[in-house]
Image (cartoon, rainbow, N blue to C red):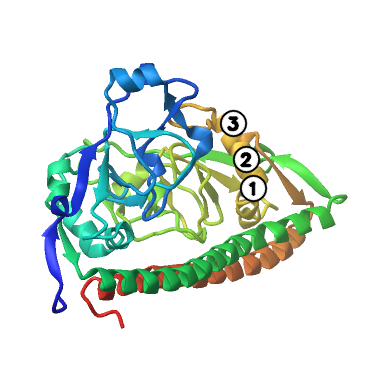
Amino acid sequence: MKAGWQVKPLHSLALTITDGNWVETKDQSDSGIRLIQTGNIGTGFFKNRCEKSRYIDDATFERLRCTEVFPGDCLVSRLPDPVGRSCIIPDTGEKMITAVDCTIIRFDRDVLLPEFFIYFSMSQSYLTAVADACTGTTRQRISRTNLGKLPIPLPPLDEQKRIIAILDETFEGLDRARANAEANLADARELFEATLREELEKNSTDWRECSLSDIGQTVTGSTPRTSETGNTGTFIPFIKPGDFLPDGRLNYESEGLSEKGAASSRILPPGSALMVCIGATIGKAGFSDRSIATNQQINALVPSVGICGEFVYLQMLSKSFQREVIQNAGQATLPIINKSKWSALKVRMPHDLSRQEAVTAKMREARNHVSSLEKHFTTTLADLTSLRQSLLQKAFSGELG
């Protein structure tokens, strides 16, 4: 810690530190006093989210004895993710309150500037201290009491202002760099889709539209009985949704099946196109280059003679195919597309296998190029995040020049 700096508990630096109010759905109205919720608190910034705003009326404000939130107050979310994130409330032109899972902090600006705290709350040292003070098994949270005990570095006011000015300028540049990298990443991901669209439109007259059932056999995976011993091993890979890699390859190194386990499973030949058809990762697609088995969350197309399975897999990645999967999965809590609906989904196919393979080679090249670009821009984003944390660490250890 730099000479002249102090470390004090958070509660000692605030004129006010109190939780928001318990406001139930029945207490809310269509207009009036705005209810700021944990979803409005970003990591260092306020998320306005006007379209999701909730309100209470004046009578409810009085009845619940609500605490008003003012522009310039800091709000800290005591719930994930991450716990402890904070923002400064802007002047929205509205009277405001906040929910019980948010803590209102009104700093003594003669001691600690809110902007200094906001930057500190983005640092790994702060987030680690918050995590260590959290309780709860199902959902982690920090109590207001424990929040108030967190140690806060306290340099002189002039030093706080200097640090804020440096971080404001530097983070503005980093934000621009991040926005550019995110835009480039989005463009890279669109490149494959554009290549696929170009091929489909260019060959609109001599390609046929087929359902998956027209061009192969649909196979739904199965899991050998877990109550029976000896089913796991290294005889054949056993693919689950978590084994689908972002570039469409499959992770063959997870726990596989023994010869005994394989005997009670449905074996897929090399060249099969796979898709997760249930759960949060529904629509994730992959392509096998060897014999495998899968669990029951996965449907596979075993292509007929004269059909290139990789060509089918590449079409499964398209936005139009993914949209059809989601639309046929229904709106249940756990989305699922059954075997018959999946088999009825459409793809477009050249009549000739050699043409399928030629287009596949071109699309594979585009896919590999996109994967390379995605890796580059993802690394850039990770580097920017690391740089931000490095600057914050230097700032709050007194090493920021």
At horizontal 25% and vertical 52% (from top left) the residue drawn is 107
Residue 375 visible from this viewpoint: no
Secondary structure, mark 2, is helix
What residue sits right under mark 3 in the picture? 328
Residue 108's quadrant in the figure? bottom left
CB of mark 3 within 8 Å of CB of mark 2?
no
- Pick out the residue farthest to the bottom: 401
Q: Give the x, y percent position of residue 5.
A: 15, 72
Q: Amino acid at mark 2?
A: Arg
At horizontal 43% and vertical 52% (from top left) the residue drawn is 292
Looking at the picture, tell me which residue is in the foreground, 370 or 32: 32
Residue 269 visible from this viewpoint: yes
Decide: few, some or many residues near mark 3? Use Cα within 10 Å; few <14, some 14-19, many ≥20: some
Q: Amino acid at mark 3?
A: Asn
At horizontal 42% and vertical 33% (from top left) the residue drawn is 95
Left or right: 350 in relation to 346: right
Placement of the C terminus among the 4 image quadrants:
bottom left
- Separation of disc 1 and disc 3 at Cα? 14 Å
CB of mark 2 within 8 Å of CB of mark 1?
yes
Secondary structure, mark 3, is helix
Report the disc number at residue 323. 2
